[in-house]
Image (cartoon, grey):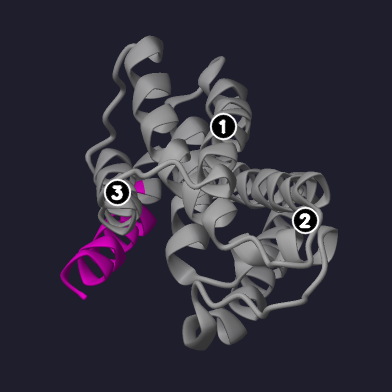
Amino acid sequence: MRDRNRQRFATTLRFLALAAVAGLMPGIAEAHITQVGSGGFLQGFEHPLSGADHLLAMFSVGLWGAQMGGRNVWTLPITFPLVMVLGGILGITGVPLPAIETGIALSIVVLGTAIAFVWRPPEWLALSIIGIFAICHGYAHGAELPLAADPADFAIGFVLATGLIHLAGIAVGLGVQRTLGNRMVRIPGGLIAMGGLYFLVN
Protein backbone atom coordinates (compact mmCIF):
# COMPACT_ATOMS: atom_id res chain seq x y z
CA MET A 1 0.00 0.00 0.00
CA ARG A 2 2.84 2.37 0.91
CA ASP A 3 4.64 1.57 -2.35
CA ARG A 4 1.46 2.35 -4.29
CA ASN A 5 1.09 5.69 -2.48
CA ARG A 6 4.71 6.57 -3.19
CA GLN A 7 4.20 5.76 -6.86
CA ARG A 8 1.16 8.04 -6.93
CA PHE A 9 3.15 10.86 -5.31
CA ALA A 10 5.99 10.37 -7.79
CA THR A 11 3.56 10.42 -10.73
CA THR A 12 1.91 13.58 -9.40
CA LEU A 13 5.26 15.32 -8.96
CA ARG A 14 6.32 14.42 -12.50
CA PHE A 15 3.04 15.75 -13.89
CA LEU A 16 3.39 19.04 -11.99
CA ALA A 17 6.99 19.43 -13.10
CA LEU A 18 6.02 18.89 -16.74
CA ALA A 19 3.15 21.36 -16.37
CA ALA A 20 5.51 23.95 -14.90
CA VAL A 21 8.02 23.47 -17.71
CA ALA A 22 5.25 23.73 -20.30
CA GLY A 23 4.12 26.97 -18.77
CA LEU A 24 7.63 28.39 -18.64
CA MET A 25 8.71 27.59 -22.19
CA PRO A 26 6.74 30.28 -24.04
CA GLY A 27 6.88 32.67 -21.14
CA ILE A 28 10.61 33.11 -20.79
CA ALA A 29 10.74 34.79 -24.17
CA GLU A 30 7.50 36.78 -23.79
CA ALA A 31 7.38 37.77 -20.13
CA HIS A 32 5.18 40.82 -19.57
CA ILE A 33 4.29 41.27 -23.25
CA THR A 34 0.55 41.62 -23.88
CA GLN A 35 -0.87 41.67 -27.39
CA VAL A 36 -3.31 44.46 -28.16
CA GLY A 37 -6.76 43.15 -28.92
CA SER A 38 -6.38 39.81 -27.16
CA GLY A 39 -9.33 38.64 -25.09
CA GLY A 40 -10.32 38.58 -21.44
CA PHE A 41 -10.51 35.29 -19.53
CA LEU A 42 -7.98 33.29 -21.57
CA GLN A 43 -5.50 36.16 -21.67
CA GLY A 44 -5.88 36.61 -17.93
CA PHE A 45 -5.42 32.88 -17.34
CA GLU A 46 -2.29 32.77 -19.49
CA HIS A 47 -0.73 35.86 -17.96
CA PRO A 48 0.62 34.34 -14.70
CA LEU A 49 2.06 31.51 -16.80
CA SER A 50 3.67 33.84 -19.33
CA GLY A 51 6.58 34.93 -17.15
CA ALA A 52 8.95 32.87 -15.02
CA ASP A 53 8.98 35.60 -12.35
CA HIS A 54 5.22 35.40 -11.75
CA LEU A 55 5.21 31.62 -11.88
CA LEU A 56 8.09 31.22 -9.40
CA ALA A 57 6.61 33.64 -6.89
CA MET A 58 3.15 32.05 -6.96
CA PHE A 59 4.59 28.55 -6.78
CA SER A 60 6.65 29.67 -3.78
CA VAL A 61 3.55 30.82 -1.90
CA GLY A 62 2.10 27.30 -2.05
CA LEU A 63 5.45 25.71 -1.26
CA TRP A 64 6.04 27.98 1.75
CA GLY A 65 2.55 27.34 3.09
CA ALA A 66 3.04 23.57 2.78
CA GLN A 67 6.41 23.83 4.53
CA MET A 68 5.03 25.83 7.46
CA GLY A 69 2.03 23.54 7.80
CA GLY A 70 -1.12 24.03 9.84
CA ARG A 71 -3.48 26.77 8.69
CA ASN A 72 -0.71 28.33 6.61
CA VAL A 73 -1.17 25.60 3.99
CA TRP A 74 -4.39 27.37 2.96
CA THR A 75 -4.28 30.89 4.41
CA LEU A 76 -1.25 31.95 2.36
CA PRO A 77 -2.54 30.68 -1.02
CA ILE A 78 -6.01 32.11 -0.35
CA THR A 79 -4.72 35.52 0.77
CA PHE A 80 -2.40 36.03 -2.20
CA PRO A 81 -4.97 35.99 -5.05
CA LEU A 82 -7.52 37.96 -3.00
CA VAL A 83 -5.05 40.79 -2.35
CA MET A 84 -3.73 40.46 -5.90
CA VAL A 85 -7.15 41.55 -7.16
CA LEU A 86 -6.70 44.84 -5.27
CA GLY A 87 -3.32 45.31 -6.94
CA GLY A 88 -4.93 44.50 -10.29
CA ILE A 89 -7.55 47.22 -9.77
CA LEU A 90 -4.78 49.72 -8.99
CA GLY A 91 -2.99 48.70 -12.19
CA ILE A 92 -6.10 48.85 -14.36
CA THR A 93 -7.05 52.31 -13.05
CA GLY A 94 -3.51 53.62 -13.57
CA VAL A 95 -2.73 54.49 -9.95
CA PRO A 96 1.05 55.10 -9.94
CA LEU A 97 3.06 52.66 -7.82
CA PRO A 98 6.86 52.79 -7.98
CA ALA A 99 9.31 49.90 -8.38
CA ILE A 100 6.73 47.22 -9.17
CA GLU A 101 9.20 45.08 -11.13
CA THR A 102 11.69 45.32 -8.25
CA GLY A 103 8.95 44.25 -5.86
CA ILE A 104 8.16 41.23 -8.04
CA ALA A 105 11.83 40.17 -8.14
CA LEU A 106 12.15 40.70 -4.38
CA SER A 107 9.10 38.52 -3.81
CA ILE A 108 10.93 35.59 -5.40
CA VAL A 109 14.10 36.25 -3.40
CA VAL A 110 12.28 36.63 -0.07
CA LEU A 111 9.94 33.67 -0.51
CA GLY A 112 12.70 31.40 -1.81
CA THR A 113 14.98 32.40 1.07
CA ALA A 114 12.19 31.83 3.60
CA ILE A 115 11.75 28.30 2.26
CA ALA A 116 15.48 27.63 2.10
CA PHE A 117 15.97 28.67 5.75
CA VAL A 118 12.71 27.04 6.94
CA TRP A 119 11.51 30.39 8.32
CA ARG A 120 8.26 30.12 10.24
CA PRO A 121 7.15 33.65 11.20
CA PRO A 122 3.86 34.39 13.00
CA GLU A 123 0.88 34.00 10.70
CA TRP A 124 0.11 37.74 10.67
CA LEU A 125 3.65 38.52 9.49
CA ALA A 126 3.62 35.83 6.80
CA LEU A 127 0.27 37.12 5.52
CA SER A 128 1.55 40.72 5.55
CA ILE A 129 4.57 39.71 3.45
CA ILE A 130 2.35 37.75 1.08
CA GLY A 131 -0.05 40.71 0.82
CA ILE A 132 2.65 43.23 -0.10
CA PHE A 133 4.00 41.00 -2.84
CA ALA A 134 0.49 40.19 -4.07
CA ILE A 135 -0.09 43.91 -4.66
CA CYS A 136 3.01 44.03 -6.88
CA HIS A 137 2.00 40.99 -8.93
CA GLY A 138 -1.62 42.09 -9.22
CA TYR A 139 -0.60 45.59 -10.29
CA ALA A 140 1.61 44.17 -13.05
CA HIS A 141 -1.28 42.03 -14.33
CA GLY A 142 -3.73 44.93 -14.22
CA ALA A 143 -1.37 47.43 -15.86
CA GLU A 144 -0.84 45.01 -18.75
CA LEU A 145 -4.56 44.50 -19.39
CA PRO A 146 -5.13 44.20 -23.15
CA LEU A 147 -7.10 47.10 -24.64
CA ALA A 148 -9.89 44.85 -25.89
CA ALA A 149 -10.14 42.67 -22.78
CA ASP A 150 -12.93 42.80 -20.23
CA PRO A 151 -11.33 43.66 -16.84
CA ALA A 152 -13.60 41.31 -14.85
CA ASP A 153 -12.98 38.33 -17.14
CA PHE A 154 -9.26 39.08 -17.21
CA ALA A 155 -9.16 39.21 -13.38
CA ILE A 156 -11.06 35.94 -13.04
CA GLY A 157 -8.60 34.31 -15.42
CA PHE A 158 -5.44 35.42 -13.64
CA VAL A 159 -6.85 34.66 -10.18
CA LEU A 160 -7.83 31.13 -11.27
CA ALA A 161 -4.41 30.49 -12.82
CA THR A 162 -2.72 31.85 -9.69
CA GLY A 163 -4.74 29.50 -7.49
CA LEU A 164 -3.74 26.52 -9.62
CA ILE A 165 -0.05 27.48 -9.38
CA HIS A 166 -0.44 27.75 -5.59
CA LEU A 167 -1.98 24.28 -5.53
CA ALA A 168 0.98 22.95 -7.52
CA GLY A 169 3.33 24.44 -4.91
CA ILE A 170 1.33 22.87 -2.08
CA ALA A 171 1.27 19.47 -3.82
CA VAL A 172 5.02 19.51 -4.43
CA GLY A 173 5.76 20.70 -0.89
CA LEU A 174 3.59 18.07 0.78
CA GLY A 175 4.78 15.38 -1.63
CA VAL A 176 8.47 16.11 -1.01
CA GLN A 177 7.94 16.21 2.75
CA ARG A 178 6.17 12.84 2.78
CA THR A 179 8.59 11.05 0.47
CA LEU A 180 11.95 12.74 1.11
CA GLY A 181 11.52 14.66 4.36
CA ASN A 182 10.84 18.26 5.31
CA ARG A 183 14.43 19.44 4.91
CA MET A 184 14.45 18.55 1.21
CA VAL A 185 11.93 21.35 0.57
CA ARG A 186 14.80 23.75 1.29
CA ILE A 187 16.49 22.80 -1.99
CA PRO A 188 13.83 24.20 -4.34
CA GLY A 189 13.60 27.22 -2.02
CA GLY A 190 17.28 27.96 -2.55
CA LEU A 191 16.94 27.55 -6.32
CA ILE A 192 13.93 29.87 -6.35
CA ALA A 193 15.84 32.51 -4.37
CA MET A 194 18.69 32.33 -6.91
CA GLY A 195 16.18 32.83 -9.70
CA GLY A 196 14.87 35.88 -7.88
CA LEU A 197 18.38 37.33 -7.67
CA TYR A 198 18.69 36.87 -11.43
CA PHE A 199 15.49 38.87 -12.04
CA LEU A 200 16.56 41.49 -9.49
CA VAL A 201 19.91 42.06 -11.22
CA ASN A 202 18.47 42.01 -14.73
Crowd band around label 3 with a 10 angstrom C-alpha radius: few (<14), some (14–19), many (20+): some
Residue at x-position 37% and y-position 21%: 128
Q: How far apart are marks 2 and 1 (CA)?
A: 38 Å
- The image shows residue 100, relative to residue 128, as above or below, that is below
Tell me residue 139's x, y (percent).
Answer: 49, 47
Residue 180 appears in the rendering: no
Label 1 sits on residue: 86
**Element on which disc 2 rests:** helix
Q: Quadrant of residue 188?
A: bottom left
Label 3 sits on residue: 103
Q: What residue type is labelled 1?
A: Leu
Q: Distance between the residues labelled 1 and 3?
A: 16 Å
Tell me residue 51's x, y (percent).
Answer: 51, 71
Label 2 sits on residue: 8
Dominant secondary-structure state across the stretch colored magenta: helix
The answer to whether residue 175 is left or right of residue 107 is: right
Does the magenta-highlighted stretch encompass residue 199?
yes
Does the magenta-highlighted stretch encompass residue 181?
no
Residue 69 appears in the rendering: yes
Residue at x-position 78% and y-position 62%: 149
Residue 199 vs residue 170, the one in the foreground = 199
Q: In which quarter of the image is residue 123?
A: top left
